[in-house]
Amino acid sequence: MKDVDSAVKPINENGRTSQRPSKGHQSVQSSAADMFPPADVCARYGVYPKRYDLDVGRLHRYRTSRLHAEMDKRGCDALLLFDTVNIRYATGARNMQIWTMHQPARYALVLRSGKTVLFEIGGRSHHAEGLPLIDEVRVARPWFYYYAGSQASNHVKEFAAEIADLIGLSKASAYKPRLYVDRCDRMGTISLEDAGLIVSDQAQELMEQARSIKSEDEIAATRIAIDVCEAGIRRIKAELRPGITELSLWSYFHQTNIELGGEYIETRLLTSGPRTNPFHQEASQKQIQKGEMVTFDCDLIGPLGYGADLSRAFVCAAKPTAEQRNLYQRAHDLIMANTQLLQVGRSFAEIIDKASVLPQAYRQWHRVAHGNGMSIGEFPAIGRRPGYPQGSIHEGRIQEGMVLCVGTFAGRKDGGEGVKLEHQTVIRSDGPELLSSSLFDSEFCN
């Protein structure tokens, strides 16, 4: 096992030959270095003094063991990952996460033999600095139009040939290695098959199954993300005043996350007054008025790439009305009841069958609970597809070590305001343990 403090040397001039990690080269820090913000920033946001029992090297080794176990189970010889979250899970390296979600400029190859190769834009090795489990950094060979232009067909053939060579495809052997890919367009898939590989599109299922059971280090990383998220929630409450726009209020949440070492927010779900119902409207330039409900879904990716999926509600510069308290209490009570259903061994189907729902006069939320980790929303999704009244999404049972979020939306079908609430738990042998702060609010709950 490589040393946690090892680093990756720069690649060679030809851009093809990469270097193994070596000790003592720490001129550049990877994203693993920003786990804890400076003390003065932490103090300003009230997230210190809190210590986390987190070993980054151990965290990475656990994630790799999860991947290899799933590969062994499926007879998968190699994983080729383009999804930025999957790359982060497998390697620990991040690089322009949002941009590369829609421009597949980097990818990673995980071999069943144990080797992990990161293909970076221009072969930039500093993104892997200090990360323990990356064996090589190579120059990525993307073939999307912005980077390839009219040479896409040539680039994709070179890409496929390099992947086949790394996997160890031999023309002298009749055996064709099985390559699992998460996101790859038709041109890439055909080129990999033409190179002699058996290509499966089941990598996303493999990855999400691997990601679904968290180690204690991952749970600690999730606690960090939740602390950052709750600092942002406090900031929203402090800045909430009549006349502020929804977008201006939401910007304080973004600032808090970034300043505390977080990465990005996946959605823009903050609304006020009549825009709170139905849910899933995005923040706008609407000015918030005194006495209006403000509700939001955080969907925050914090330090080290772990997520906090919390939802809260406040009333602007006034005490809640009877109807606002009614909405909040309905959402709160439903979440608390459904959280207790999340017991080890219980099937998802049984949870859906026993789950509490709001009266028919209210909009029905599609989800009882969902997994959360390095993405806001991952396996398991315990509930039904949005917009479809029948059919559950995933089959399975609750397992110890799952991090699950439980939430709902309370809003009447005939109009009025609405409330979105959600909290985050980890499943223990004796039931769910709350990771986020209590949803109980004395202003709403009496």
Image (cartoon, rainbow, N blue to C red):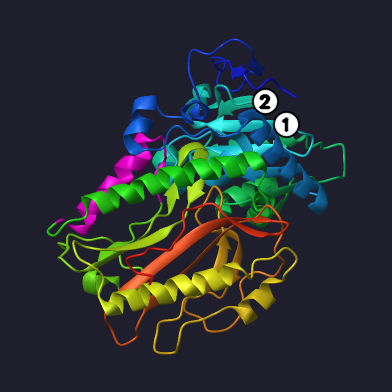
Q: Callout 1 environment at 10 Å: few (<14), some (14 to 19), or many (20+)?
A: some
SS category of the residue bearing label 1: loop
Q: Quadrant of the N terminus?
A: top right
Of mark 2 and mark 1, the one earlier in the sequence is 1
**Disc 2 residue type?**
Asp
The reply to whether discs 2 and 1 touch (Cβ–Cβ < 8 Å) is: yes
Q: For this rendering, which residue is in front, 35 or 337?
A: 337
Inter-mark Cα distance, 2 to 1: 6 Å
- Disc marking residue 322: none
Q: Position of residue 362 (x, y in %)?
A: 40, 84
Which range of residues does the magenta coloring cover? 244-265
Image position of 98 with respect to 205: above or below: above
Quarter assignment of residue 167: top right
Q: Quadrant of the C terminus?
A: bottom left
Along the horizontal axis of the image, is 308 left or right of 353?
left
Residue under pointer 1: 115
Q: Residue at x 56, y 76 (%)?
A: 384
SS category of the residue bearing label 2: loop
Q: Callout 2 environment at 10 Å: few (<14), some (14 to 19), or many (20+)?
A: many
